[in-house]
Image (cartoon, helix red, strand yellow):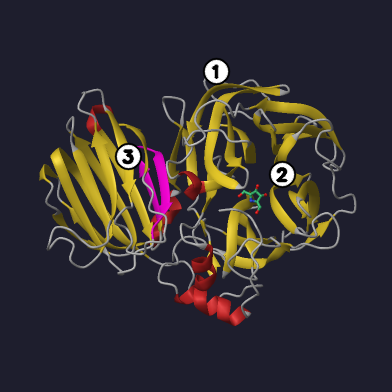
């Protein structure tokens, strides 16, 4: 996706809503905007028990233009109530868009720090909220930082991570230094209004690695998110030495939204000392611009933007674009990398259940009938693969699936164990047969999957065109655009795969009634 404005006229509001509602590919249990365009999660938080999800929103149509902050609230992270738009562009430093940012609690006053866009430039702005977080006033001092650091040749400058450290506020603004790499500039303030520049927290090296690689760090870092992964908070001495600090960013290059990555390491004083670089989601750009927060029960919860894989024209025709991920609980795995799982609250949407008995699948490549079908599903499997074995879970398969052994359309999740017995393998999403529409993105997505003793816990959430996969905590998120309304779920094995458990549920939808573009 490139974030250019679209030279399109607007569609009447009723028409936009009607088009979006009529699209069979629109998810039913993920958060989507009422219609029009949605991108990054913003201001994700829990405030006095209520969860808040703000998001980049264009209610004029399914294209990125004159971005506002949409807003929805929830008491359970599952069902969302649309709230009035929180921020919209107005004369001044955000006249061309209210771009991404965060919510902080300023001594009881809800406060947004966001990027105001004017012309081709973004600068940090602040808005304060009413006690119910439903009305927002931009402060007269905006922009609160007048310009990017002087004398630095930057590629771009926007998005914010703001936290309290002792008696001061600290802020990161995402950026990149031309000829070097992505970075996050660190600032300090006593009042969120007057900021002092400290320096770059850490500078990436864009000359490292191949720009085509899925872990290339890019020329600019969007939506930086710094947090302490286990106990303790940023800037304090970690109670146990192994609680890493994590710097999440979305690698961007010259208008290309590439993929989310994270550094593990230690944040101390004015810098971040990295120990490792990791892919955050094997779906790359399909889980972009993630933002996280710690909820009142202490969980770190992350949302990301599931971009579209269809053309600009197809999005406009559909009347909507962009899906918010299900909220994910973020934990630290034994190897020090992050592990992810959908919040357990999602399970309350489970309806009809199908279970399969434990069995050994000795593969010939012929599909096993699962008796499961649907386009809104939650699947949970425990499997054990012998060295060299492969398990394929087919989703959204068209009608002839299982009869001819090959459906015309099918999206296939593949777990492969290497032949060596060390418990290494691969998670892959094969979308090559996912759609007969030749214009949609069907690139392969994959990543390494540690599987001790060949064991994999696989969780798959299918919601029409949105697929979120978690294999031993490694996420792979992507979009698919089947044209044949296929709903079959198939299982095939090559080599020996023990199916230890298999459970599938249909999933209820979360939006019952009509929604308004401007609630
Ligand atoms: N989207 C926002 C920017 C951010 C980008 C604009 C990431 O603030 O850098 O809608 O997707």
The label nearer to you, 2 versus 1, is: 2
The answer to which quarter of the image holds residue 134 is bottom right
- Residue furthest out toward the top: 241
Residue pointed to by mark 1: 241
User: Compared with residue 383, is residue 23 higher up or lower down, i.e. above or below?
Assistant: below
Asked which secondary structure carries label 3, the reply is strand
Q: For residue 16, what is the image quadrant?
A: bottom right
Question: What secondary structure is the magenta-colored segment mainly?
Answer: strand
Q: Position of residue 64 (x, y in %)?
A: 63, 61
| Residue 363, x across and y down, in percent | 11, 43
Give the CA separation, mark 3 to mark 2: 33 Å
Q: For residue 327: magenta?
A: no
Q: Is 141 located above or below residue 281 in the figure?
A: below
Residue where numbered disc 2 is placed: 158
Q: Residues within 10 Å of mark 3 (few under 14, many from 20)?
A: many
Circle 3 sits on which residue? 427
User: Which badge, 3 or 1, comes first in the chain's sequence?
Assistant: 1
Residue at image point 12% right, 44% down: 361
Nearer the N terminus, badge 3 or badge 2? 2
Direction from residue 318 to residue 370 in the image, left or right: left
Which residue: 35% across, 37% down?
472
Q: Secondary structure at mark 2?
A: strand
Asked if the residues shown at circle 3 and circle 1 are in contact, with their CB atoms under 8 angstroms apart, the answer is no
Instruction: Give whichever of 473, 208 is nearer the camera.
Output: 208
Instruction: Residue 105 in the image: state x and y as whole percent.
Output: 74, 46
Q: What stretch of residues is rendered in magenta?
A: 467-480
**Image point 78% across, 45% down: which residue?**
106
Above or below, 509 relative to 303: below
Q: Nearer the viewer, residue 228 or 13?
A: 13
Of residues 202 and 257, the one drawn nearer to the viewer in this rendering:
257
Among the two numbered marks 2 and 1 on one chain, the one whose residue lies closer to the N terminus = 2
Q: Which quadrant of the view contains residue 131? A: bottom right
């Amino acid at each position: 996706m490139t974030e250019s404005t679209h030279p399109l006229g607007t569609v009447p509001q009723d028409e936009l809503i009607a088009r979006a509602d009529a699209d069979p590919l629109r998810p039913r249990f993920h958060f989507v905007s009422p219609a029009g365009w949605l991108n990054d999660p913003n201001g994700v938080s829990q405030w006095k028990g209520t969860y808040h999800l703000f998001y980049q929103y264009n209610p004029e149509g399914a294209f990125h233009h004159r971005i506002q902050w949409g807003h929805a609230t929830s008491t359970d992270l599952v069902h969302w109530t649309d709230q009035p738009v929180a921020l919209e562009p107005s004369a001044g430093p955000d006249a061309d868009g209210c771009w991404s940012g965060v919510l902080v609690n300023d001594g009881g006053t809800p406060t947004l720090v966001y990027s105001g866009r004017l012309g081709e430039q973004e600068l940090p702005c602040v808005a304060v909220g009413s006690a119910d977080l439903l009305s927002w006033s931009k402060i007269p001092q905006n922009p609160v930082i007048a310009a990017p650091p002087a004398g630095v040749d930057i590629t771009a400058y926007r998005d914010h991570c703001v936290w309290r450290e002792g008696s001061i506020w600290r802020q990161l603004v995402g950026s990149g230094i031309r000829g070097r790499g992505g970075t996050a500039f660190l600032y300090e303030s006593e009042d969120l209004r007057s900021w002092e520049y400290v320096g770059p927290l850490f500078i990436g090296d864009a000359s490292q690695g191949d720009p085509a690689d899925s872990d290339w760090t890019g020329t600019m870092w969007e939506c930086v998110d710094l947090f302490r992964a286990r106990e303790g908070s940023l800037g304090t001495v970690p109670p146990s030495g192994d609680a890493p600090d994590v710097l999440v960013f979305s690698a961007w290059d010259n208008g290309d939204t590439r993929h989310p990555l994270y550094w593990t390491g230690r944040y101390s004083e004015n810098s971040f000392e990295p120990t490792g670089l990791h892919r955050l989601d094997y779906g790359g750009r399909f889980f972009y611009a993630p933002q996280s927060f710690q909820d009142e029960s202490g969980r770190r919860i992350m949302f990301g933007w599931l971009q579209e894989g269809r053309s600009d024209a197809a999005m406009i025709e559909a009347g909507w674009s962009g899906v918010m991920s299900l909220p994910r609980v973020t934990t630290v795995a034994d190897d020090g990398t992050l592990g992810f799982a959908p919040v357990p609250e999602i399970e309350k949407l489970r309806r009809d259940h199908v279970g399969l008995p434990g069995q050994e699948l000795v593969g010939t490549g012929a599909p096993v009938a699962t008796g499961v079908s649907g386009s809104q599903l939650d699947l949970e499997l425990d499997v054990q693969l012998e060295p060299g074995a492969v398990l394929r879970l087919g989703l959204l398969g068209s009608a002839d699936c299982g009869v001819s052994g090959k459906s015309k359309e099918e999206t296939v999740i593949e777990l492969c164990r290497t032949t060596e017995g060390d418990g290494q393998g691969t998670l892959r999403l094969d979308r090559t047969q996912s759609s007969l529409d030749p214009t949609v993105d069907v690139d392969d997505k994959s990543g390494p999957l540690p599987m001790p003793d060949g064991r994999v816990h696989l969780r798959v959430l299918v919601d029409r065109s949105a697929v979120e996969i978690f294999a031993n905590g490694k996420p792979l998120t992507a979009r698919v655009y089947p044209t044949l309304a296929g709903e079959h779920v198939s299982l095939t094995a090559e080599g020996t795969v023990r199916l230890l458990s298999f459970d599938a549920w249909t999933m209820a939808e979360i939006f019952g009634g009509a929604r308004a573009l401007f609630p």
